[in-house]
Image (cartoon, helix red, strand yellow):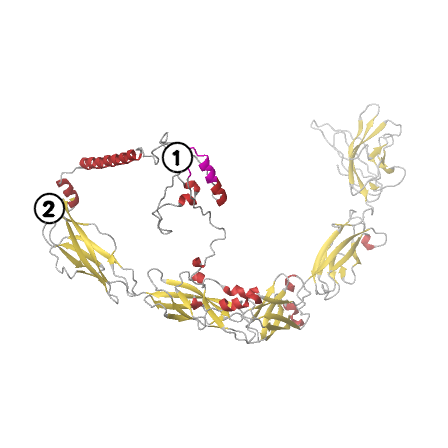
Amino acid sequence: MRTYHCLSLFIWTYMYHTTDAIPFQEKGNSDLPSERILGLTQDDGKMLHRTKRGWMWNQFFLLEEYTGTDTQYVGKLHTDQDKGDGNLKYILTGDGAGSLFVIDENTGDIHAAKKLDREEKSLYVLRAKAIDRKTGRQVEPESEFIIKIHDINDNEPKFTKDLYTASVPEMSGVGTSVIQVTATDADDANYGNSAKVVYSILQGQPYFSVDPESGIIKTALPDMSRENREQYQVVIQAKDMGGQMGGLSGTTTVNITLTDVNNNPPRFPQSTYQFHSPESVPLGTPLGRIKANDPDVGENAEVEYSIAEGDGADMFDVITDKDTQEGIITVKQNLDFENKMLYTLKVDASNTHPDPRFLHLGPFKDTAVVKISVEDIDEPPVFSKVFYLIEVDEDVKEGSIIGQVTAYDPDAMNNLIKYSVDRHTDMDRIFSIHSENGSIFTLKPLDRESTPWHNITVTATEINNSKQSSHIPVFIRILDINDHAPEFAMYYETFVCENAKPGQLIQTVSVMDKDDPPRGHKFFFEPVPEFPLNPNFTIVDNKDNTAGIMTRKDGYSRNKMSTYLLPILIFDNDYPIQSSTGTLTIRVCACDNQGNMQSCSAEALVLSAGLSTGALIAILLCVIILLVLVVLFAALKRQRKKEPLIISKDDVRDNIVTYNDEGGGEEDTQAFDIGTLRNPEAREDSKLRRDVMPETIFQIRRTVPLWENIDVQDFIHRRLKENDSDPSAPPYDSLATYAYEGNDSIADSLSSLESLTADCNQDYDYLSDWGPRFKKLADMYGGDDSDRD
């Protein structure tokens, strides 16, 4: 059922008992009811009687946010069936019935029990009916109606964000869009101007402006510079009621940042820079830093440095430090104070990412002058080459000059220079050098086959200042001389079959030569001149540095000759020609029909003598038995009774035994062993008495061991104590002589016999650092020529 309403509307509804209610049409603001009469016929054809019914109420609108003390009157429900006698009861159902909306069941008056908010709910759908209190019968069909909440301006505009952040490039033109802000109003946009929002700027003028309808913030000043000011804070207000007086408003803050553009060229803070550098500084050494300032940031502030011009453009280089945006001046070539003392450079600093929009402002680069002064220092000698290569024949005579090195003092003083060979690179002392002219000569014969290369180091030292020295490698290549004869490459075990035929190949031999001729090896094979024609074998030169041994006769006999010796003359084609004779041993062996060896002459001879393997083992056992018997006989002979020195026990006179054995001195190591006296613990363990028979031949004399570092006096006292307490010592007076020298001295030998045969291995340059007291020694030894080595 649809309901039509206006500010004051009375609706009369006529309904039949058997039909649905038909709504009335809206009549503007008039209170006249419209009546519609329908006649219906049932299926049985009987006519129904019409009964007049009708609802009446006159208010459908309600203001929100009511602040009065009484309940807000909504409207009145009334039907023409109500006679005012209180028999009818009005009932209200639907949205908010009983809670928000209450009805007087007797009169039909509707009131709002609570304050309503249109923004929460703008309309309510309710249903009303009237019933007879006595019968409880519904006198009017249930009718639906709508209560609409009228809006009031009770909501201020609200921005979608409390804080906006935006950015715009610096130097932008007027009217450049920055950001759009948006505010919404919860009031009804279709009812009055409560929701019509207008934007305005409260803070941020005159730099920015805002469109009052769209809320777009734009630049208001041209060419704003980030370098002057980077951050701006703009406050925007949104006001409803079209911005009129009494409207509600809300604000938001917009932080605007000017982003950088490359509108500033780099600038040097000073026009001239001064640096100093020693002339001996290594290549690549930084001498100083220069920096051109650029107020831009990021890649717009990146600076590239380059040398534009100057007399030192080839001597120096400039490198850009990406972290600090500084230019580093480095050494590109070796400096020489004697050659040039001052260099002048022009260094450019330019942006790497220029902006074409601002090129009209001028060139985006700057130039500074860099002056570099070279300082003089005492430099070591300089060789004429970075290394020397010397080639010499291996047969050069000792003392021959094989090459020369030259060095000079680059300083203005031009000090004299002496040369020497670093003996750590020439341990065998094969080469030496003249200290004055740098001529290298040999001290020993050379051999290419043992050492084809010699790498030595030559030192050039200033005579007036031994600390200034330079080293240079000298590579000496030994050239080959044909001084080795060719020889067999291996040992050949050659055999010939007894049933061999003439012209049969029995062996192919090859040779080797330690020499290395530039044109390669070429060897020749011939019979020796003493036996130019061998009746048994033929030597065939294969012309490929090999030779074949061929049989010369038909068949060989082991019984007649089991082994043949074939001498072969081998010579090369280099100059001078070297030759040698190699002897090939050829055994005669028994072979099968295919030429496979079965047995050779050595085994045949053994078998012919009738000696089998068992016989050889028997002979070996006999030899071992004989050796055992000899050893036993010698052991028994040593155990025989020895005659005592004193025959009679009554003879107790002093006995003096004299031994006239002088020995051969220190060089005589066979006369006697003095190791026992020098090492007490190496003496004999047993000593038998010579005047009485010992109780057992195995009685062992135990003595206290002596320490290795024992004192000589302590050693003698211990020896004396041992003899006094020894029960097996002779009872008569005896003379015991001990030659104990003791251990070596920790100070080693002070004799000059074991000193170096020459002092060339000693470096006496350190004597110059010991002060004036050792100046004489430094002049005597430090100035020796290396050839004295």
- Left or right: where 218 falls relative to 663: right
Give the number of marks.
Answer: 2
Q: 764 or 576: nearer the eye?
A: 764
Residue 468 seen by the camera: no
Give the vertical position of 735 relative to 238 (above or below): above
What segment carries the magenta color? 718-733
Which numbered tag is attached to residue 652?
Answer: 1
Determine the CA span between mark 2 and mark 1: 82 Å
* Picture quadrant of residue 281: bottom right
Crowd rating for badge 2 (residues with CA inside 10 Å; few <14, some 14–19, many 20+): few
Q: Position of residue 218 (x, y in %)?
A: 73, 60
Give the vertical position of 556 relative to 303 (above or below): above
Farthest residue in the left direction?
A: 554
Crowd rating for badge 1 (residues with CA inside 10 Å; few <14, some 14–19, many 20+): few
Badge 1 element: loop
Residue that label 2 marks: 559
Reply yes or no: does residue 168 show up in magenta.
no
